[in-house]
Amino acid sequence: MILIVDDRPENLISLSKVLQAHNFEVDTASSGEEALKKVLKNNYVLIILDVQMPEMDGFEVAEAISGFSKAKDTAIIFLSAVNTELKFITKGYLSGGLDYITKPVDINVLLLKIKTFYRIYDQSRKLNEVQEKLLEEIEFRKQAEHKKDEFISIASHELKTPLTSVKGYIQLLQRSINKDDKVTAQNHLNKASIQLEKLNDLIVDLLDISKIESGKLKFNMQSFCADNMVNNAIEMLQQNFPDFKITKLGKTEEMVFGDEIRLEQVVINFITNAIKYAPGTNQVNVTINIKDGKLYLAVKDFGIGIDTEQQQKIFEKFYRVEESSNRFNGLGIGLYICSEIIKRHGGTIGVNSVLNEGSEFYFIIPITEENMIAIEN
């Protein structure tokens, strides 16, 4: 929009009509004070400013406008019928004007100048947009680099912890063997096996995320019994965590099309997290049902919970809940891998949680190949 500032109504009317006839949007002000008020409220591409005005002349108006951050990209053209000497033209440029035109005005020349300023404004706007996008990209890459460095540090620590434990238990095992203490030796062997299993789980997660990044995570899609898959996962984890009561709610005999091993991986991750992040409790509920051609599975715990803001990020790569990262081990990639597995099944994954009351992680997937393909398309 163009703002025309002139204390003579006839000048405002005539110039406005000409510009509007050439499809320019026009606003007017009959004094410097009125112009400043409008500049504070509105955005203008160009201000055509008369020099000779009572109380506040065009130079003073331009100097005041130059101090407004809102109008820093606004071009100013001075118009003058009286002050045509070089010193006034120089003053106009020093006051912040980009051009100084003397009256009588050649309207064709003025229109060309206005069109040029509009092009410059449009190019400047596009350049600013590109610059902002570049800055956003740079910020994203700095954050990504920081996350990667943080992940490498965490991964190194997490891998080193069970490895150090295994070394320690092997040394104790050797001493027990030398003393012919079979009971103690068996105990050390069992503990070493647990740490080796932790190490194996970490390595599997690292391999999975590497395959996801390279697009090489393979899926063996076929029909299977979801109920049996969940029962197997619960049975295995119940043996590993005998102090926890893992209760299955619901049952289904329908077959599901998908990768049974990968989906079991998701269920196991949900249940182990439910146990891990619920210290002081002993109950986990696993719900399964099929409705409207979709499998619904949820794992509910009664632990520390997750606040609303963190729930939006929990499935992001390398994300770890800040309040929990110092208390609980983990690489921050398990739920990300789960989300990628569910996406490959054309499903959705989510969490419902109340801080200090518990969390319920769930996924929903179509049970037939036809529905899965329809969703992907």
Image: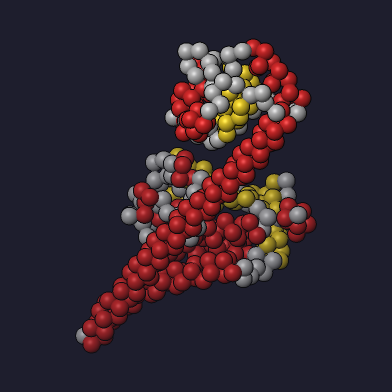
The quadrant in which residue 159 appears is bottom left
Observer-nearest residue: 352 or 99? 99
State the image coordinates of residue 209 (x, y, percent, origin top left): 53, 66
Observer-nearest residue: 182 or 224? 224
State the image coordinates of residue 50 (x, y, percent, origin top left): 57, 21
Instruction: Look at the image and tell me whether residue 192 can be seen.
Output: yes
Q: Residue at x 59, y 41 (%)?
A: 125
State the image coordinates of residue 117 (x, y, percent, origin top left): 63, 37
Quarter the N terminus occupies: top right
Q: Residue at x 46, y 48 (%)?
A: 301
State the image coordinates of residue 28 (x, y, percent, origin top left): 62, 18
Horizontal side of residue 164 vs 10, given as left or right: left
Quarter the C terminus occupies: bottom right
Q: Residue at x 51, y 50 (%)?
A: 136
Horizontal side of residue 188 vs 73, given as left or right: left
In the depicted structure, whether residue 237 falls above or below residue 9: below
Horizontal side of residue 163 vs 316, given as left or right: left
Observer-nearest residue: 199 or 51? 51
